[in-house]
């Protein structure tokens, strides 16, 4: 296809503008998306996949040296982030099914939290969680659930 | 195809046996699977899909007359059941993203529980939940999360 | 002092009225005070002292047959009720320090709840609790706390 | 009373010894006792009285600049510390009855935690809490309770 010089200039400008916009969007999109690697305040690591269009993700939770959880193996997680890219502090939720060494106990943790970006641009995940260990019977159910918080910072 | 009477009898027996086994399996499988309709102790209803092979399900959470939650619209849920069909009291987890009337607040609930079958064969779901309402800023984060329990019984 | 019959009649009426009012007030006051004996939905019993003027009480938590908690001994509790006698559904809080058989582990439960009077006059205590078992070190702290609910009904 | 120089010397030595011992005991006793002033990770301050012989204390919870809780007034707290002076990381529990500006809503928080001494001698309080706001009726009870964590460091 033949173009006049004027058209070519206009195309080049449009391309440059698109690249600049893409860079801005990429930068903005990276803020407070769960995709990537995170370290918890108990020394565990978490790797989260790229988010799908509707905000879903999968990933892995890995034991850390500080956690003293040598019994935990790399465990799968699944969840989603709400209003990702639309709000400054999007909420998220994910479930981890724990893979345990030398144990067939069923343990599941539900994390519910929010991603905050600090004034320095650092992202922090604040989450509360419930951890359930399968009870043997209804009379044991009352003691099946633990509660706590986790704070995650991004590993660069 | 022609069959000898003996073969036919054997086939008929095999079919009958298969039906009996299927009935038993169906009966056993129905116990403490989340698939179906449930009513919570606060009067809400929950409809859960057939479980996938790996225990996943989707469904809806519906407001109930007793809940006094006229602000809540039918809301989607997703989750999974662990060791379904393999253990008598399987654990489960699911997330509800609340659809609210006249509000664009983001609210999410994570349920974590276990299904128990009573001596009368009645199934009951015992769950703890965390409910997070998006905080406007990190300094508001401390008050973002509610906690509670729900007990569900099957609607027949 | 001499009185005319009319005055005496008026006095007698006032006395009768006062007695009726006192009975009503007594009946109303008894509603949703924690003083007395309660049974939890897990089969434990709780005995609560008469409330002090500022709403404080002490008492005991006793293991029950249904609880399967033969390891628990009678354990002291202390707490207070807010706005007792002033509001229809007063809130309360109390702490139990568990006395355990064959164990010197420190376990404490904080109960936080509210007393509701049903249409039939039955009182019910709805409470959420946190149970902490002393962690050996900060790295074990994350798993020290359990959460759950208890519902108590009055033992008559 | 007259004393020989020897007796006087001995008395002076005994006094000096007593002072040294007192200093040691004081130093040891100060570790992970709740008595004193603390700052929470949300910027609130807490002042705790000297512990009684059986570990009880009272005190005040004060709003802080970072908390954005200008609605909170100085609020009384009461609680106790278990095994104070006997174990390295004693547990504690206390209840705060919130005094609110321009509000007669009843709000109560139960804190349940443990005191840890770091390798640098710094004391840190790790606590989970439940916060209940009085519900108007049983059908509102499900949403009455919030949950979270607080970390306190000593103000010197």
Image (cartoon, coloured by chain):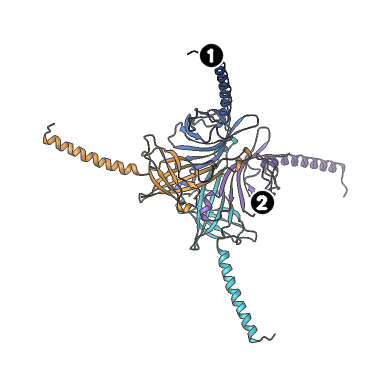
Chain colours: A blue, B orange, C cyan, D purple
**For the residues marked 1 and 2, what is the alpha-carbon distance in whole angstroms?**
73 Å
Residue C123 location (% of width, % of height): 51, 60
Label 1 secondary element:
loop
Foreground tag (1 vs 2): 1
The relative height of residue D9 versus residue C58 in the rendered view (above or below) is: above
Crowd band around label 1 with a 10 angstrom C-alpha radius: few (<14), some (14–19), many (20+): few
The residue drawn where x is 49% and y is 50% is B70
- The reply to the same-chain question for discs 1 and 2 is no
Q: In this view, does A4 lie above or below A98?
A: above
The residue sitting at 51% across, 46% down in the picture is: B101
Q: Which of A10 and C114 is in front in this view?
A: A10
**Residue at 24% across, 41% down:** B19
Answer yes or no: is residue A82 visible: yes
Q: Which chain carries label 1?
A: A
Circle 2 sits in a helix, a strand or a loop, which is it?
Answer: strand
Q: Mark 1 points at which residue?
A: A4
In this figure, which residue is indicated by the disc labeled 2?
A: D100
Q: In this view, does A116 lie to the left or right of D60?
A: left
**B117 sits to left or right of B17:** right
């Amino acid at each position: 296809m033949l173009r006049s010089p004027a058209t070519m200039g206009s195309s080049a400008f449009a391309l440059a503008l698109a690249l600049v916009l893409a860079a801005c969007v990429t930068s903005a999109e990276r803020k407070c998306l769960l995709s990537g690697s995170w370290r918890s305040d108990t020394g565990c690591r978490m790797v989260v996949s790229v988010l799908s269009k509707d905000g879903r993700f999968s990933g892995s939770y890995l034991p850390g040296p500080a956690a003293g959880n040598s019994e935990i193996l790399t465990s799968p997680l699944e969840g989603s982030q709400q209003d990702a890219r639309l709000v400054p502090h999007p909420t998220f939720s994910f479930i981890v099914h724990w893979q345990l060494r030398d144990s067939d106990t069923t343990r599941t943790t539900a994390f519910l939290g929010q991603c905050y970006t600090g004034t320095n641009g650092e992202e922090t995940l604040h989450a509360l969680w419930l951890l359930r260990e399968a009870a043997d019977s209804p009379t044991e159910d009352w003691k099946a659930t633990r509660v706590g918080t986790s704070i995650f910072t991004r590993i660069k």
